[in-house]
Image (cartoon, rainbow, N blue to C red):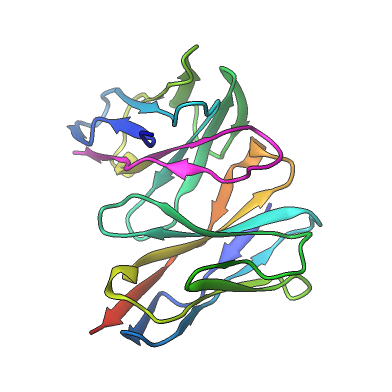
Amino acid sequence: DAGVTQSPTHLIKTRGQHVTLRCSPISGHKSVSWYQQVLGQGPQFIFQYYEKEERGRGNFPDRFSARQFPNYSSELNVNALLLGDSALYLCASSLVLQGPPYEQYFGPGTRLTVT
Amino acid sequence: AQTVTQSQPEMSVQEAETVTLSCTYDTSESDYYLFWYKQPPSRQMILVIRQEAYKQQNATENRFSVNFQKAAKSFSLKISDSQLGDAAMYFCAYRSERGGADGLTFGKGTHLIIQP
């Protein structure tokens, strides 16, 4: 079975621009989470979606938004990009929102560089 | 809010030897889950091992085992018979029993170097 896929692999944007990152979960997984990993740090939680609804949000500004589609794929949108938004953005999928199994499975990430 | 601390930014071990990576966490919850993830230079986060807080028995997965001390809020990872392929960043992560509302909380990671 295919794992979590993300696109694009890498992109470069200019300050003030908008970006959309995409994620496809493992087949059968209904929950998708997004994380931001700044160089040298552990990932930080941005959002979790389950059955197309937002179920959790981390401490990120309103410039960050996301949505989940009927096929359970997801998009992360970031408006008015800042230099500090440069990071690896990780998508993770899980089978359910609560209860076992508890693991989240990660995709390879999208490296965003803001200049 | 929960916090996860990994006090060893970098560890080095000889191939075939054993190494232990440390992790402590802070929480007021009694039910939760702990994980170790591995992130090689390819960037993909790979789940290494999982521990449920309600289980007293330490989890084991082949050469990987944990020492879970709930009272001390400690969750260390032991890698036996280290192999060159074990070289990576290792992250300790916490997940509330309440589910995904808070996502996973990660530590800053430990860079593991394997000396041939």
Relative image position of residue A105 (x, y in whole percent): 47, 43
Along the line of sight, the residue nearer the viewer: B42 or A80: B42
Q: Is residue A99 magenta?
A: yes
For residue A113, above or below residue B50 = above
For residue B12, above or below residue B96 = below
Residue A48 falls in which quadrant of the image?
top right
Assign the C terminus of chain B to one quadrant of the image: bottom left
> Please, which residue is most extreme toward the right here?
B30
For residue B80, above or below residue A34 = below
Report the side of B115 relative to B35 (left or right).
Answer: left
Relative image position of residue B51 (x, y in whole percent): 65, 60
Instruction: Identify which residue is drawn at 67% across, 70% down.
Output: B58
For residue A99, above or below residue B66 = above
Q: Which residues are magenta?
A: A90-115
Instruction: Identify which residue is drawn at 81% across, 57% down.
Output: B30
Along the line of sight, the residue nearer the viewer: B8 or B34: B34
Report the side of B95 relative to B86 (left or right).
Answer: right
Residue A115 falls in which quadrant of the image?
top left
Relative image position of residue A112 (x, y in whole percent): 26, 38
- Residue B112 in sight: yes
Report the side of B94 relative to B64 (left or right).
Answer: right
- Residue B108 in sight: no
Instruction: Identify which residue is drawn at 35% across, 33% down.
Output: A2
Q: Is residue B103 magenta?
A: no
Instruction: Identify which residue is drawn at 20% across, 34% down.
Output: A11
Relative image position of residue B102 (x, y in whole percent): 63, 41
